[in-house]
Image (spheres, rainbow, N blue to C red):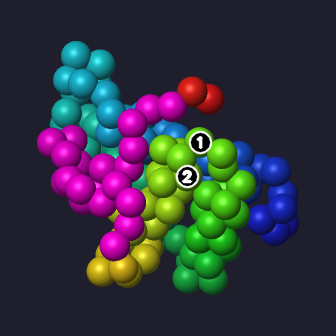
Amino acid sequence: MDNSDPLVMILTGFIVDFTSWLDSCGDDEVALDSAVKIMEHVAAVLRDAPPAQRPRFLDALDELAHSEQDPNRRDAFLAFPHAIGLADSKAGSPGSGRTRRTVAVARLSPPYPP
């Protein structure tokens, strides 16, 4: 299975979409503690993936970013590896500002239509 496998691309897009949505939720939608725990867990699972799989995930993010027409979603794909610690955060990425919801995960982007 490579990045051209539709499931790899669908799940990679879902992870970014879900964490972006979670980051944009207000306290009346999702409790702050719950949102932070979920986002930290997602980041930890991806950082703990076998080293041989990390380039595959990063390639999928890059491919999704380059094929995405929505600029906000494209920025979310580009920012995601920096936000979760899979890429050098010194490189400067779109959406790398901190929000009240994020402790270990940087702000990704506002929600967008599916």
- Which residue is found at the position 63% from the left and 66% from the top? 62
Q: Amino acid at mark 1?
A: Asp
Q: Which residue is mark 1?
A: 70
Q: Amino acid at mark 2?
A: Arg
Q: Is residue 64 left or right of residue 78?
A: right
Q: Is residue 55 left or right of residue 31?
A: right
Res. 15 visible in picture: no
Whole-Å distance between the Cαs marked 1 and 2?
6 Å
Give residue 104's position: percent from left, percent from top: 24, 59
Give residue 15's position: percent from left, percent from top: 54, 47
**Foreground residue among 49 and 75:** 75
Q: Which SS class for mark 1?
A: loop
Locate the N terminus by quadrant. bottom right
**Is residue 98 magenta-colored?**
yes
Residue 5 in the image: above or below residue 31: below
- Which residue is found at the position 71% from the left and 55% from the top? 67
Q: Which residue is mark 2?
A: 74
**Is residue 109 magenta-colored?**
yes
Residues rendered magenta in the picture: 92-112
